[in-house]
Amino acid sequence: MRIKHATLAVLIVGIIFGGVLISSAMGLWQTESSKTPQKIETGAFAGEGDPVDIRGSYTFSDIANAFPISVEVLAEAFSVEENPADFQLKVLEANYPSEGEVEMGTSSVRLFVARYTGLPYERTGEEALFSHAVEFLVQEGKLSGEEAVLIPTMEPKAVLKQEEETVIEEEHVEPLVKGNTTVADLFALGLSEEEIISVIGEYGSKGEVVRDVCNSNGVAFSAAKLTLQELAEE
Amino acid sequence: MKSRRWVQIGFFLFIAAIAVNHGLTEAGGGISWIPNASLHAICPFGGVVTLYTYVTDGLLIKKIHESSLILMGLVLFLSILVGPAFCGWVCPLGSIQEWIGKLGRKLMGKRFNNLIPNRADQILRWLRYLILIRVLMVTAQSVQLVFSAVDPYYALFQFWTGEVAISAIVVLLVVLGLSLIVERPWCRYACPFGALLGITNLFRIFAIRRKPATCIGCKKCNAVCPMGIEVSTTTKVRDLRCITCMECTSDAACPIPETVELLGGKPNEN
Ligand code: SF4
Ligand code: SF4
């Protein structure tokens, strides 16, 4: 069988554009990265979404897509009445100014989602929840009485304002700091020695894996990697 | 004008329009009927470097999008069918080198394409495989888009954004400059994606075949080949450098009908 010059032209254009059309019809064509949290890498929950990776740019429906939790439960827990599916987490922070170390924001959603779904999450101490949400979790048997008293609570405002500028899309970034990142990698990301020590504690050599350093210093790696990520992005 | 030229111009303008529109959209403007996508999302090579981490832990390299994996799949499929036609027909970087090369041919006359000694060429042509291996290794280790620091494809359409590494712009300028004395210098000696696609020349379904029975030995096919392949001495082009541009065929350079053709299935060698 022979392919002529003009036939080849049609074939090339057809395969490329046809392929793109078919894949977008099947919903596979994505030029923007999707809002899917990173997967937990090890342990009993390996393969599940990691609540630590929930970002301020996520909406309640992004979370409902990624975790076994419904928009309604989230809306109730965070007292969002208007259009909860499109509610962006960072609006919480904008509406509830942090009280000292404690804030009602993205980390609160991380905590709530984790306790509701039973996925692992270590509290950093800054996450506040509304008291009715804490009660709800206890009633559902998803939160122990001992932990419940440790979680700082706040009371919801009547109406949340979804301000224009807070809804700007934030590009989803893949994590720079992962389970196998070494101290040397952190330097390569532009962090200074003081910054690194302040987050993960003292380390032996630059070849050490950040996670191990955290473990031996008793620092929570899940929280440390987010802090490092933020420092690296500055 | 040959259909290849039209396809090249079409893809060049299309990709340039997408790149400009992406810039405009980021700046708040943007034209709605032109697709808006980051260049990273539409470069199939991004798919190659990301594949490694995609299969190991389902993580796309920072800045690369699933669309580039799909594009890579389509381009590979095309290449298995007809060889690296992506290089000869679609890649805007290849096209622009070729266009500059036309000017070079006018300026340099006979010396065009003849300045690099044969021996050097024979060694240099493996360089792009070294680059491919290096890029894959480094990217797999660091999960960063290392290649963008020197990627002239990216520089070509983004040089105005200030987002491009200086090194990439330098590489682009060097490549465009060299295009004046040798055809497609980037494709011949450096392009890791071309290197990868080139491998399909060993087993592509439709190959460039020459019928010795009707060939008159005029060597016109050799003279036009942008990759410097000697078509006139083979019956089937298996050279890793062929980009399926069809310039050597009886549709174009070869003066004898049905002598050099893109043929599939059993060769009717006689
Ligand atoms: S151009 Fe055609 S006739 Fe001339 S050498 Fe090549 S194959 Fe033979
Ligand atoms: S001229 Fe022929 S052999 Fe040379 S690259 Fe084009 S198709 Fe391949």
Image (cartoon, rainbow, N blue to C red):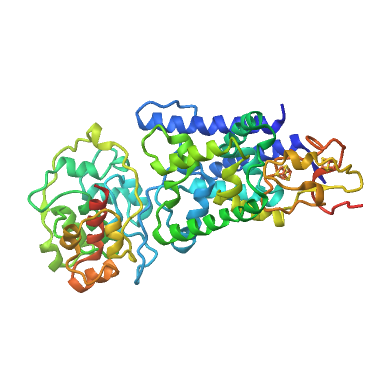
**Residue B6 image offset from top left, x and y in percent:** 66, 29
In the image shown, does A166 or B184 lie closer to the viewer?
A: B184
Residue extending furthest toward the left? A100
**Where ligand 2 lies, by image quadrant?**
top right
Q: Residue at x 31, y 48 (%)?
A: A71
Q: Quadrant of residue B11?
A: top right
**Residue B87 image offset from top left, x and y in percent:** 62, 43
Q: Residue at x 14, y 54 (%)?
A: A128
* Left/right of residue B150 with respect to residue B84 in the rendered view: left
**Residue A185 image offset from top left, x and y in percent:** 31, 60
Q: Is residue B35 visible?
A: no
**Residue B5 image offset from top left, x and y in percent:** 66, 31
* Left/right of residue A84 with respect to residue B67 in the rendered view: left
Q: Residue at x 36, y 52 (%)?
A: A174
B213 w.r.t. B203: above or below: above
A17 w.r.t. B190: above or below: above
Q: Is residue B73 visible?
A: yes
Quadrant in which the N terminus of chain B appears = top right
B80 w.r.t. B40: above or below: below
Q: Quadrant of residue A169?
A: top left
- Could you tell me how many numbered marks the image carries? 0
In the image shown, does A127 or B10 lie closer to the viewer?
A: B10
